[in-house]
Image (spheres, rainbow, N blue to C red):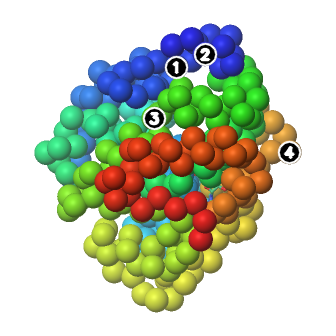
Amino acid sequence: IKVPQYGRKPQLFRYRGFVYPDFVVNDVKSIHQFDVREDDIWVVSFPKSGTTWVQEIVYLVNNGADFESAGAATIEERFPYFEWIVPGLKSIEKMPSPRLIKSHLPLTMLPNQMKDKKPKIIYIARNPKDTVVSYYYFLTKFVIEDNIFNGTFDEYCQLFIDDFVHYGPWWKHVKEAWERREQDNILVLFYEDLQENIHKAVWDIAGFLNKPITEAQVNDIVKYCSFETMRNNKAVNYDWLKDVGAAKEGEHFMRKGQVGDWKNHLNKDIVDKLDQVVATHLTPLGVPIRDTL
Ligand code: A3P
C-alpha cells in the first residue's frame, strides 16, 4: 500500500484484513509457527492503548510485587515485544517460563498454537479518539527516517479512519478481542476503566492470573504504576530510545496519560467520523467504548 506520508519507502502491508509494518509481514511464517506455552502470559493491544501500564501491573502481580526486580531491567527486557525484531522470536522462544510477552498483533494473527495451549491473554482497549492522538504524537518522537510519519495531524487521523495505520483497522482489532471475551483464558480490559478504578483493575488482573495478593500489595502497585511515577521510572518510560538515538531528545513517551485529551486535538469532522466508526462496528456488539469519564 503506498501512502507517501510514511517516509521514503512504503511501510504498510495488508495481510488477512489488517495493515502491518514490514517486520511483521517479513516474519509471518515464524509468527504462525511460534512455540506457545500454557504458562505464558500475553498482554495484547492495538498500539497506544495503555499496554505499558498493563504490562507493568502484570509483571508486579506475577512476581509478588517485587519492585526491586521491576526496577532492575527495562520493561522491554522483562516483557518483550513479540513481533518486534529485538529480541526476536527465536530469543523469546528460549526464555524461561513463565514468559511475559507483549504483542500488538490482533488475536487472529497470534501463533497457531494459542488455540490449543490457551495461555492467559490480557487484552487492553482504549477509545479511538485518545488512541489516535496518542499514536500520532508517539510517531513524531522517532528519528528513524523510514518509519516516521511526515504528514499533518489531520492527515494522520484520516489515515486512521481509512485503516491505513499499522495494526489497523483499530475497530477490527478490538472486535476480535471482544468476541472472545467469554473464553476462560482471555481478559478484556479498557483503559478508561483503569483510569476510573485502578485498584479494581489490579485485583481483577490478580484474580485472572490466579495470583495471591494482599491489599497492601495492591496499594503499592497502584502507586508504583501511577502515571507520574511511571513517567519518571527509567525501567518503563522508554527514555532508553533516546540513549540509542532512536527518539528525539526532550520528548516523553509517557505523554499525558488522560482520558479525553482528544478534546484538545480533534476537529469536529474527525470526531464525527470516529463516532461513526464506533457506531458502525462496535456499538452493535455492545462494546462499551467511552471517551470521557
Ligand atoms: P497518551 O499518549 O495519551 O499520554 P501504550 O503503552 O500502549 O503505548 O500506550 C501509551 C499511552 O498510555 C500513553 O497515552 C501513555 O501516557 C499512557 N500511559 C502509560 N502509562 C500510564 C499510566 N501509568 N497511567 C495512565 N496512562 C498511562
Mark 2 is surrounded, within 10 Å at the Cα level, by few (under 14), some (14 to 19) or many (20 or more) other residues, namely some
Left or right? Give the position of 166 relative to 26. Answer: right
- Which of label 2 and label 4 is nearer to you? 2
Q: Report the residue that reaches farthest toward the right.
A: 250
Where is mark 2, residue-wise?
Answer: 3
Along the line of sight, the residue nearer the viewer: 280 or 61 = 280
At a point 42% along the width and 20% down the height, the residue shown is 14
Along the line of sight, the residue nearer the viewer: 276 or 64 = 276
At a point 66% along the width and 61% down the height, the residue shown is 260
**Circle 3 — which element?**
loop
Mark 1 is surrounded, within 10 Å at the Cα level, by few (under 14), some (14 to 19) or many (20 or more) other residues, namely many
Verify CB contact (< 8 Å) between mark 2 and mark 1. Answer: yes
Mark 2 to mark 3 CA distance (whole Å): 15 Å
Q: What residue type is labelled 3?
A: Pro
Whichever of callouts 4 and 3 sits on the residue coming sooner in the sequence is 3
Whichever of callouts 1 and 4 sits on the residue coming sooner in the sequence is 1
Verify CB contact (< 8 Å) between mark 1 and mark 4. Answer: no
Along the line of sight, the residue nearer the viewer: 291 or 218 = 291
* Residue 250 numbered mark, or none: 4
Q: Position of residue 167 (x, y in %)?
A: 47, 33
Where is mark 3, residue-wise?
Answer: 169
Whichever of callouts 2 and 3 sits on the residue coming sooner in the sequence is 2
Along the line of sight, the residue nearer the viewer: 98 or 250 = 250
Quadrant of the rendered image containing residue 261: bottom right
Q: Is mark 2 within 8 Å of ligand 1?
A: no
